Amino acid sequence: MTARAQSFWARFLLPGGLWLFLLFAIPLALVLALSFGFTDDLGRAVYAFELDNYADAFDPLYLPVLLRSVGFALATVVLCLAIGYPVAYYIARYGGSKKHILIALLVIPFFVNYLVRTYAWVALLADEGLVNSALGSLNISETGLQLINTPYAVIGGLVYGYLVFMILPIYASLERMDPALIEAGKDLFGRPFQTFIHVTLPQTKQGILAGCVLVFLPAVGDFVSAQLLGGPDTYMVGNLIQDQFFTANNWPFGSALTVVMMIFLSFWMVGYLRSAAREARDPVAA
Amino acid sequence: MGIVDLGAPFTRRQALQAAAVGAMGAYGLSGCTVSRELDVPEGGVSVKPGIDGDLLIFNWAQYMDPALKKAFSERYDVEVNEINFDNLEAMVTKLRAGGRYDLIWPTPEYAYRLNKEGLLANFDRSDLKNADGISSFYDSGWWDPNSEISVPYAYYTTGICWREDEVSGMTGSWNDLTNPDGEGRMFILDDYQEAIGEANLINGWELNTPDPNELEISKETLLEQKEFARGISTNSTQNLVNGAASIHQAWNGDIVNVRNQVDNPEVFRYQTCKEGVPVGTDLMCIPATSRSPGTAMLFIDWMLDPENSAQNVMWNGYPQPYEGAREAFASLVEEEPSIDVDLNQLGEGGLEYRLDSPEDRALWTQIWTEVKAS
């Protein structure tokens, strides 16, 4: 491409770039600026340059909250992968002419607000809710199980909330894969399981990785699931940050926690990007 | 090939430049508050009743009978528009950012701070025809010593709701939160003042104690309660109706709603506690930046009218401290009179949350964070 053509096409970046600058970069800079600020006597956030909020953010008190959030998010990733891969595999390989309908069926529920969908889970998992009455009528459990207000309910809510972000990239990578590769594996006397492990799985590695990152990052910072489905011991980083803004009246500390969290999460993101870049440069070795 | 491409490499030099620009931006902002300077006249705003434009009221959702807004609109030939907030911090942020509303619903603590900032208009209660019906408890409150920035809208007690079919041996004390019959099915309110407040009362401290040693002991009380609890939540209505809770620290108005929503209201009992009864209030205030403060004052008077306030109570189920509304609420809860607010209680055993020192607020919120995070 000539330099001239390049500069012509670069202009198309302008609207999107401007949008991101105004509504993403500037607010982010304000969060960063506020994280060095303090709260005045009337409860107003004031910009300043103090490091106190960061000293507080690394208080060991918050370590269990962070570990819990990462633990919940990792459990969510594992479950999403276990549930999502077979679904993506079925649709990509055997969906046939119904592929697009199946994908639409997966995506449509996600148009409904996450908060509303989580409220639906509250009704499902309640002691006298649908799941427990089904268990009761099947004589599986007469007294009913405590499902809601447990860590399991929180992880369940996260899996439900972010599952589609696992399925779609895996589906895309399966779609891109040449089916002849599987046939070749079989021709080389691979049993179906061996063929899957040695042929399909490596071919979809980047899709799996993308899915894991897309599920993990929002799950770590989530607060809705823990707030609505959690119990006394499910407090997550997202809840901690939300409380700083809405109840503790401490926006500067909330901002500092947000910045620390973003730095923490960007390590995972950079790790993923490097792996993706390596794959793009040298697909065979990766 | 991944979903995201790296594109052009972002060099270290560019990163440093970006950081420098960010830091300069932060330096330029230094000392500014997040809110902007509002155009409020020196010496404050003084309001007289009289139609001076349409109304925009900024309220909690589902907190006022829409029929009353419509009737006001027809009576005075003005529009009454309503928008809602779902927490006070968001409301105050919008007000500070220059949002112009004619009527807002803060708590005393928020009203106190907004007034200190000069964001509330002054008015003379004697200009309100129905002001005589307001409970005398609301004359010269600590947040409004001259009764010139606020009138009460609703008030509520904090107590314990329990299910009589599952829990026995309640004693009328805050210690009943850990009644053994409720183990694993007890909820504490997710509100730093309500939670620390009941722990303070259990330990025999002042409700609003700023003493770090006392608060440390209250924190231990809360940690023990947390072991016993099923959750920390302000959704008491939902937790009680769907069967998750058998004991719930709760606001009395929510129990009216619970009893309306279940098939067996008689088992949902409510008690206030002998160690002390926290009483909360939502106020009506006119922001200094209001475009139609005169209409807003007429609207306040309209809501205080005995017939209108009775109608409003029957609609939203929250007790209101004026003539007409008090009788209506008593009739609403005649089967469980403990839900009613006893006005004598407000004078004597009734306690109010009051943390107007920022250091105390910070200490309290820190204690609560430690309870929730551990």
Image: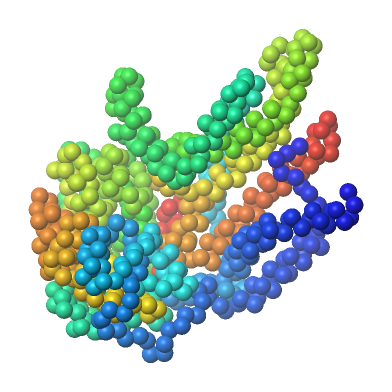
| Quadrant position of residue A75 | top right
State the residue lying farthest toward the bottom. Answer: B43
Kindly tell me whether residue A224 is visible in this rendering. yes
Which x, y percent locates residue B217? 36, 59
State the residue lying farthest toward the right. Answer: A2
| Above or below for B207 versus B188 | below
Which x, y percent locates residue A195? 72, 17
In the image, taking residue A21 as reference, residue B17 lies left or right, namely: right
- Nearest the eye: A168 or B348: A168
In the image, taking residue A194 as reference, residue B133 lies left or right, namely: left
Q: What kind of colouring is applied to the model shown?
A: rainbow
| Quadrant position of residue B341 | bottom left
How many marks overall? 0
- Nearest the eye: B152 or B13: B152
Quarter of the figure with the C terminus of chain A: top right
- Nearest the eye: A125 or A91: A91
- Nearest the eye: A166 or B350: A166
| Quadrant position of residue B296 | bottom left
| Above or below for A59 versus A192 | below
Q: Residue at x 17, y 65 (%)?
A: B309
Q: Residue at x 68, y 61 (%)?
A: A18
In the image, taking residue A19 as reference, residue A220 lies left or right, namely: left
Q: Residue at x 68, y 70 (%)?
A: B23
| Above or below for B69 versus A267 | below
Q: Residue at x 37, y 77 (%)?
A: B290
Which x, y percent locates residue B236? 29, 49
Which x, y percent locates residue A123? 35, 37
Kindly tell me whether residue B273 is visible in this rendering. no
